[in-house]
């Protein structure tokens, strides 16, 4: 207990987040905790606390925030956003943080798989042939096809997508 | 804009594993005189990629809006996630010139352009705003007055309130009204507007399933005979995962989970076999007996 741990801090981090679409109101947070007390995930998770994440960003704890697994637990239900008395748009701040984490290659595999699937077929999931056949037998019209070439071309230059494509 | 012709946007989850929603929705919309045109080509609305790239989400959503503009038709979606995304992006790009220009740079590469001339709506919004309650009631030939059910809305059809602007997220009434149009009673229960947990599946199944379990407990407490959903993901949480939740937490629910169009379809006198009931995981035989379908 004698050794003091120093927290690495980046004083510019809060401004970096505030400049991104959805993060604009970050500095308004006055730590009332409405987001956390109304969060359905926080109700059952031992670790996910949106108020804490917001405070850590304000303190500049960039690495701790972006490398934390709990960042990915948010269900994007937007209850926090709707109830925040300071209009922080908490869920959007979380999304900004996830985007920044993804830029550092920290996104869970699930998102990379969905991105690859969208670029291949247009659909986020790989729909099995049996499902397509079943559509026919139940009288549903054929599924519209994705235009893979056009999709990939229009997503060119988007950081995360280029990453996924490069990593294939 | 009131119309009876829409471009139908199925999204990814429905064709992947929630066929009953599409089957039943097409049946009831045909009965209500709503014309559906298929998308000329498809890509995901973008929502699944928003957590990792807001920019990719904007481009994917705008591609679909641009395609709809070319067709000169508004979009109808069955998935609240797709509806929420397309609505939010449509509004953002209509209002924010800089974002529109940024997205259009990508779209022009493939001969598309977002102009901001169309609209996107969820099935429920089309039913209440464009078709209208009276017309729906007129098609009911078999009122389901013997049923007491509970509803679950799905977050993205209501939140964030400022961007979606439909119903009241703290006390939503539309789905209840639509359910009661079938003759069934819609029960209130604790924490009705809370999330089902679906978006957290794959990140922490344990946390996600606890959310759904909490809701199922509250629904069981009011003795609802069925749960009515209007979102493919919520439906997966409660129907596909109900057995899993029962096993994981040592509970028994046996609550059938119906897509709203299945409920309305029954009230319209459409046979269960035409409404995709065989696709449901939770046993519906007791429910069918109660409404005299067996």
Image (cartoon, rainbow, N blue to C red):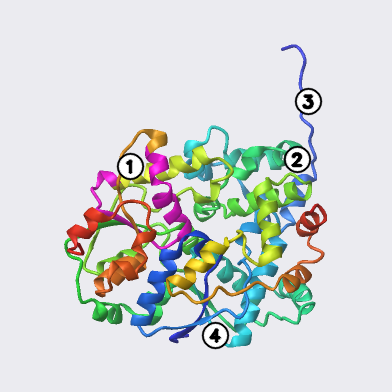
Q: Which residue is mark 2?
A: A62
Residue stretch rendered in magenta on the structure: B220-246
The residue positioned 35% from the left and 60% from the top of the image is B278
Mark 2 residue element: helix
Asked where in the image residue A51 lies, by quadrant, the reply is: top right
Q: Quadrant of residue B113?
A: bottom right
Label 1 to label 2, Cα distance in Å? Answer: 39 Å
What element does badge 1 sit on? helix
Instruction: Have a look at marks 4 and 1 and say if they share a chain.
Output: yes
Residue A50, x across and y down, in percent: 58, 42
> Residue B201: where, in percent of width, then height?
54, 46
Question: Disc 4 and disc 1: Cα gap in Å?
Answer: 42 Å
**Image depth: mark 3 or mark 1 in front:** 1
Q: Is residue B187 visible?
A: no
Tell me the residue at 47%/45% (across/down): A38
Tell me whether marks 1 and 2 sit on the same chain.
no
């Amino acid at each position: 207990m004698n050794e003091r741990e120093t927290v690495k801090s980046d004083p510019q981090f809060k401004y970096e987040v505030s400049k991104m679409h959805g993060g604009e109101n970050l500095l308004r947070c006055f730590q009332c905790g409405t987001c956390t007390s109304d969060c359905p995930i926080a109700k059952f998770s031992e670790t996910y606390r949106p108020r804490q994440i917001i405070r850590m960003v304000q303190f500049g704890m960039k690495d701790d925030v972006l490398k934390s697994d709990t960042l990915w637990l948010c269900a994007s239900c937007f209850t926090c956003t709707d109830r925040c008395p300071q209009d922080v748009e908490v869920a959007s701040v979380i999304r900004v943080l996830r985007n920044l984490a993804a830029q550092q290659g920290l996104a869970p595999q699930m998102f990379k798989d969905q991105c690859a699937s969208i670029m291949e077929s247009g659909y986020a999931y790989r729909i099995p042939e049996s499902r397509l056949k079943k559509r026919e037998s139940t009288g549903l019209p054929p599924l519209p096809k994705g235009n893979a070439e056009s999709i990939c071309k229009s997503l060119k230059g988007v950081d995360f997508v280029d990453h996924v494509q490069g990593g294939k | 804009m009131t119309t009876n012709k829409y471009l139908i946007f199925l999204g990814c989850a429905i064709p992947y594993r929630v066929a009953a929603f599409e089957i039943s929705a097409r049946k009831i919309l045909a009965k209500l005189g709503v014309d559906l045109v298929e998308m000329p080509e498809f890509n995901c609305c973008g929502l699944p990629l928003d957590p990792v790239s807001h920019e990719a989400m904007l481009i994917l959503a705008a591609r679909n809006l641009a395609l709809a503009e070319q067709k000169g038709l508004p979009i109808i979606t069955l998935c609240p996630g797709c509806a929420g995304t397309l609505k939010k992006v449509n509004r953002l790009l209509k209002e924010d010139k800089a974002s529109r220009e940024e997205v259009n740079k990508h779209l022009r590469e493939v001969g598309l352009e977002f102009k901001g001339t169309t609209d996107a709506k969820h099935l429920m919004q089309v039913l209440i705003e464009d078709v209208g309650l009276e017309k729906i009631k007129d098609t009911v030939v078999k009122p389901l007055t013997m049923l007491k059910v509970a509803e679950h809305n799905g977050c993205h059809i209501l939140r964030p309130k400022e961007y979606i602007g439909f119903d009241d997220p703290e006390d939503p009434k539309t789905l209840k009204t639509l359910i009661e149009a079938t003759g069934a009673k819609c029960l209130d229960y604790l924490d009705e507007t809370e999330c089902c947990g679906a978006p957290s599946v794959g990140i922490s199944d344990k946390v996600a399933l606890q959310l759904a379990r909490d809701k199922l407990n509250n629904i069981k407490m009011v003795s609802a005979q069925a749960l009515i959903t209007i979102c493919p993901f919520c439906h997966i949480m409660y129907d596909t995962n109900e057995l899993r939740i029962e096993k994981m937490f040592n509970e028994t629910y046996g609550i059938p989970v119906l897509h709203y169009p299945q409920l309305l379809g029954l009230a319209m006198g459409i046979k269960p076999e035409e409404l995709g009931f065989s696709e449901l995981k939770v046993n519906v035989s007791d429910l069918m007996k109660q409404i005299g379908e067996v």
